[in-house]
């Protein structure tokens, strides 16, 4: 299977919360629509340094991550970004890997939005069709 790309919108979640509370105008929410690689081999959402700046994200800390070529790389973890794919949204922290050229839509946000990569059509689709299944743990 080749690379699978999908369009997503990334929004600064702190801006979104501030707008809902009336501290900023909704048009001041920093957001960007990008074409991302649907990367089921990556756990996290990975964005570029340029996108981190454009979205005005605060840094939560640093982590060492293992990348596809087997290298361990020190990267930045940001505050939450709201990801929108069609009518589905989820907020997650992102990883900013130095020198990254592509946005990686990883397994955690895809699973959280009930999405999967269809290997036949090579596109991102709802894992349960057009209805988003929300799985909850029972006590």
Image (spheres, helix red, strand yellow):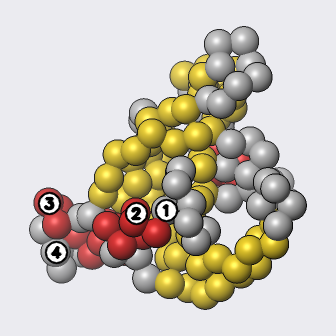
The reply to whether residue 97 is in sight is: yes
Label 2 residue SS: helix
> Label 3: which residue?
27
Question: Image height check: is 104 above or below 53?
Answer: above
In this view, the mark in front (4 or 1) = 1
Q: Residue 51 carries which label?
A: 2
Label 1 residue SS: loop
> Label 4: which residue?
24
- Residue 66 position, x and y percent, is 81, 66
Q: Is residue 126 left or right of residue 6?
A: right
**Label 3 neighbour load within 10 Å: few <14, some 14-19, many 20+:** few
**Label 4 neighbour load within 10 Å: few <14, some 14-19, many 20+:** some
Q: Are marks 1 and 2 in contact (CB under 8 Å)?
A: yes
> Label 1: which residue?
48
Q: Earlier in the sequence, mark 3 or mark 1?
A: 3
Question: Image height check: is 16 above or below 115?
Answer: below
């Amino acid at each position: 299977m080749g690379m699978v790309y999908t369009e997503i919108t990334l929004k600064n979640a702190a801006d979104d919360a501030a707008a809902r509370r009336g501290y900023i105008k909704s048009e001041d929410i920093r957001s960007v629509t990008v074409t991302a690689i649907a990367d089921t081999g990556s756990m996290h959402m990975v964005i570029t340094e340029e996108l981190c700046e454009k979205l005005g994200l605060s840094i939560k800390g640093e982590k060492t991550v293992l990348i596809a070529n087997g290298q361990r790389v020190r990267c930045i973890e940001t505050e939450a970004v709201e990801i929108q794919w069609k009518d589905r949204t989820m907020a997650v922290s992102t990883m900013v890997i130095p020198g990254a050229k592509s946005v990686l839509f990883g397994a955690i946000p895809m699973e959280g939005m009930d999405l999967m990569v269809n290997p036949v059509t090579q596109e991102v689709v709802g894992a349960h069709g057009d209805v988003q299944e929300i799985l909850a743990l029972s006590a």
